[in-house]
Amino acid sequence: MKNPNQPFDDTVYGRSRVKDSSELKAYYEEVRLLGTEAFWNVANEIEPWEPHTLSSVMFWNYEKIRPHLFRATELVSPGDAGRRVLYLVNQKRADIRAACGMLFSGIQITKPGEFTPAHRHVASALRFIMEGKKGYTIVNGHHITLEPRDFVITPNGTWHEHGVAEDGETCVWQDGLDIPMANAFEANDYAVLPEGEGQKQLFPTNYSPLTYGGSGVLPADKEWSEPYSPLFKYSWTRTYEALLDMAKVNEGSPFDGIMMNYVNPHTGGSPMQTMGAAMQLLRAGEQTKAHKHTGSIIYQCAKGKGYSIIDGKRYDWKEKDIFCVPSWTWHEHCNLSNSDDACLFQFNDLPTIKKLGYYQERAYQDNGGHQKIK
Ligand code: FE2
Ligand code: FE2
């Protein structure tokens, strides 16, 4: 059997290996006039031996971005900008405004007393709160308060708006959306309520997290039939506690350490249909082994400091730094502290990838499971 680590050979039987001739060139001209092309001229390109990413590995240093983010508060208002966001550009996917693969991400800033227009779109959205006090989101009439490191969802098609209370502090959060995916399927849309017409609050404040946020329990008297999670906010304190508890009695994954997926409590599946999210805990001094899989991952360091080796290059991170691992790219993580744990938040397109049957995973075999730095 072929060693999968050897360079792939396009001259073998089963690959396209037709050689050009003057007769074939004339033939290609003829069929082109009929709106067709010879498949064997593109087969090796569109059927790569292994998954192929169009994205670059990217690293966004929050400390450097932060002053420019705050400068935007002097330049544009959320009302005029729609949302005051610096979006994260993948240098190879700038044409589709993606941060990685078919995922969009941005960093949003909102000052006390400010709020965004109420709007909705087919694209799903999620947020990871980075800093500030008394931020809130309103999702389909649910008013939910936000704390740093909370994870919040805005499922596709839901009305939503966000703001910060007058007596709060400037809030910053990372947005994650599947906009490039929705646009690739030519399915995205947008609607906005007129100025001055925010959503009416339909439920008591924090109804969703207070009703559905109990671990391992669900309300006995409620039905839920939407295709997304009834829990709109996953609090950091409960997530971190769950990770610490799991770490007491589990080794965890050799590739991810102790990792918990955020789930829809009704189904155990992802909170929204297209995107998933997770929080992983790397214990003091922990260094994971390298693997690669299909799917695009955008990470944010939620706690601590360390580094990840991605495609043979080391990226050092600390709290609030953001980086991405494109599909089928080797990656491993290391917590640089010998006394404190480190946490990485991530969101990804894995629910889509898995539903479509596109998921593959491979462990790095050589060098004790660790990449050699290029
Ligand atoms: Fe939105
Ligand atoms: Fe991974």
Image (cartoon, grey):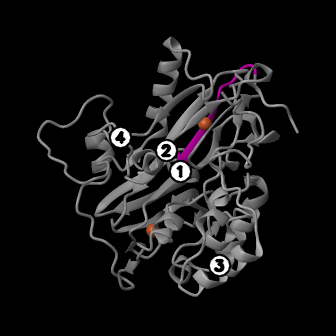
**Label 3: which residue?**
27
Q: Is residue 45 magenta?
A: no
Q: Secondary structure at mark 1?
A: strand
The answer to whether mark 3 and mark 1 are in CB contact below 8 A is no
Q: Is residue 49 left or right of residue 59?
A: left
Q: Is residue 320 visible?
A: yes
**Label 1: which residue?**
128
Q: Position of residue 221 (x, y in %)?
A: 11, 40
Residue that extends furthest to the front in the rendered view of this protein: 23
Q: Residues within 10 Å of mark 3 (few under 14, many from 20)?
A: few
Q: Quadrant of the N terminus?
A: top right
Q: Which sits earlier in the primary sequence, circle 2 or circle 4? A: 4
Q: Quadrant of the C terminus?
A: top right
> What amino acid is at disc 1?
Phe
**Label 2: which residue?**
277
* 3 or 1: mark nearer the eye: 3
Against 22, is 135 above or below?
A: above
> What amino acid is at disc 2?
Ala
Q: Residues within 10 Å of mark 4 (few under 14, many from 20)?
A: some
* 4 or 1: mark nearer the eye: 4
Kindly report the distance in space between the C-alpha atoms of the residues bearing marks 3 and 2: 51 Å
